[in-house]
Image (spheres, rainbow, N blue to C red):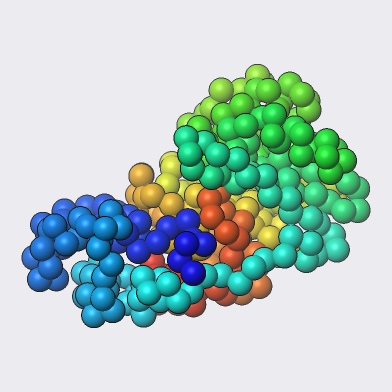
Amino acid sequence: MAYALEDEFGDIIGKARRGLGLSTAQIADATGLTEAQLSQMEDYTLKPTENKTHIIARALNLDGAKLVDIAMERWAPEPVQPGYDDALEVVTVSANVGGYPVNAYILVCNDTNNAAIIDTAAHPDVILQKIQDIGVTPTVILLTHAHSDHADGLPSIENATGCPTYIHADEPKPQSSQQLRLLKHGDVVSVGNLTVETLDTPGHTPGGCSFYTRTTAIVGDAIFAGSVGGPNISYRQEISSVQNHLLSLPDDVKLFPGHGPPTTVGEEKKHNPFFVSL
């Protein structure tokens, strides 16, 4: 089942090792494995045994049982149905950037037919066509972060829709055709009758954030099913912000990431190896 995940065993241990600032030599010393074996595992050319997975997990402060389930392809999140809430609809827009799938989302208030465009998938034409296909009225653009696969093409969407764009105040600013509106933790943006709350989830980027309404959170690259985004800025910040601001939400809250399948808070508490104490 691991093929369904954005990150599999090699990605997970590589992110944890780099996040902790450790070399393969240091992990080799701590585990009794060779640097070559560790590199091959990160590169998917060597599958670990359950015993070696537990040893690596201890060295990287990961949850061993959760990591084994992913390494042995025993877990993938249960499918999340997009139309689970009478008041809102989540429409996934998937595109490829450099050969890698990326997700953008259209969050629709069913009461008013107003919608938020959340990220751009770097393909404005795809977003605009989907808006037309489903017949909603976009009123705001929300960016989880400014990486090119999530923010490229923004001016085209702004010009076509006339919508204001919101981004976290701490995030580097992407190219825009207008003055960006800045958010901080706890700020609320209205989408029809929905209130969308900004949640700080930095670490992958300086001002990465998630957008939460009712039983839905659009989380960008803060967390994936069974993993987290690359901790480019701060591993500690990424883990703590996700744990404090996302995994503290009710278990039935759906998490829609920038890459890979959707999941839930409950699934991640049970199965994400980066969160040992949950």
Position above or below: 262 against 175: below
Query: Residue at point 71% right, 57% down?
Result: 213
As drawn, the residue found furthest toward the right would be 111
Of 177 and 200, the residue lying toward us: 177
Splitting the image into 4 quarters, where does residue 115 fall? top right
**The quarter of the displayed image where residue 47 is located:** bottom left
Residue at 48% across, 39% down = 99
Q: Position of residue 35 (x, y in %)?
A: 12, 58
User: Could you tell whether 70 is left or right of 31 in the image?
Assistant: right
Q: Is residue 124 above or below residue 206?
A: above
> Which residue is painted at 62% across and 32% down in the image?
123
Q: Quadrant of residue 66?
A: bottom left
Where residue 69 appears, x then y in whole percent? 40, 76
Q: How many marks?
A: 0
Asked if residue 277 shows in the view, the reply is yes
Residue at the far front: name it. Answer: 45
Percent from the top left, x then y, of residue 53? 27, 73
- Answer whether residue 171 is visible to the viewer in this image: no
State left or right for residue 233 relative to residue 214: left
User: In terms of depth relative to the viewer, which is nearer, 143 or 95?
Assistant: 95
